[in-house]
Image (cartoon, rainbow, N blue to C red):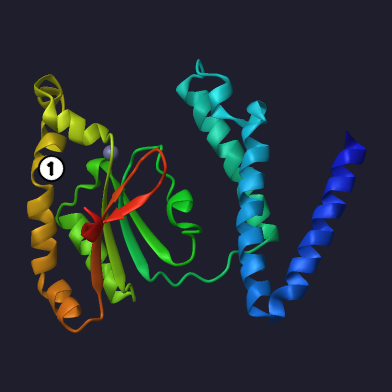
Amino acid sequence: MKKIVIIGAFALGLVASAVAAAHWTAPGRKAQFVFGGALVDVGYGLQDGVESYDFAHEHELKPAQVWAEMLKHNRLSSGMRHAFPRTAHHPLVALVVCMDARIDTNELVGDTRRFYYVIRTAGSVMGEREHEMLELAVANGVKLVVLTTHSDCAAERAAATPELREKFPALSRAVDEREASVAAFLERPTIAAALAAERLRVERVAIETLTDQLETDGER
Ligand SMILES: [Zn+2]
């Protein structure tokens, strides 16, 4: 097994070197970008198979054990961050996405670490706080705000189901008012001014939850 891992790592190193060497041409850079993305997928695939490092292996975990597991993951990951410092962040896009765990923004639009602010709320609803967060993001250089909804949304279902509305009244009201809140956001003076000056664009998309396909406003 150890031998296979060493041979695999060596082969991977060779391919990575070849791709890095191609960095000087446009097709080479594209190959490098795509190869990097493929490596991320391979990495997740490798990790997904190791249940001992996975919350899913033991659903009976107590909250304290979940917390301990989370800290363990952080120690591991921050240790790696120490060895490989992250690159600079210059967000140009702010994404508002539902908190639904099936949606992973890295799967949705690729690497969201450097160029994206991501706001996640149940049902992608915005209140004044989110409006201000987006205003702050625009003040920090964001040129595109993308407001999303998604298929099979639990928050929308709660708002549409009388028994669930009783249990989650505030969330249901926020879903009811989602459109009005978007309109209020667009009317905020700083946002309206940025839109008028074409310093900012606001797009609305629907996410197909199972496939990550984005459907733009014009396609609906
Ligand atoms: Zn949702």
> In this view of the protein, which residue sits in the foreground, 52 or 143?
143
Q: Secondary structure at mark 1?
A: helix
Q: Percent from the top left, x then y, of residue 213?
A: 38, 49
Check disc 1: other Cα within 10 Å, few if <14, some if 14-19, many if 20+.
many
- Residue drawn at (88%, 46%) of the image: 6
Residue type indicated by callout 1: Ala
Q: Quadrant of residue 131?
A: bottom left
Q: Which residue is mark 1?
A: 174
- Residue 39: x and y, percent? 66, 53
Which residue extends farthest bottom? Answer: 197
The answer to which image quadrant residue 141 occupies is: bottom left
Residue located at (54% from left, 36% from top): 70
Residue at (23, 42) in percent of width and height: 123
* Quarter containing the N terminus: top right
Above/below status of 94 relative to 141: above
Instruction: Please tell me which residue lies in front, 109 or 218.
Output: 218
Does 216 sit left or right of 192 as displayed?
Answer: right
Is residue 110 left or right of 157 when viewed as pictured? right
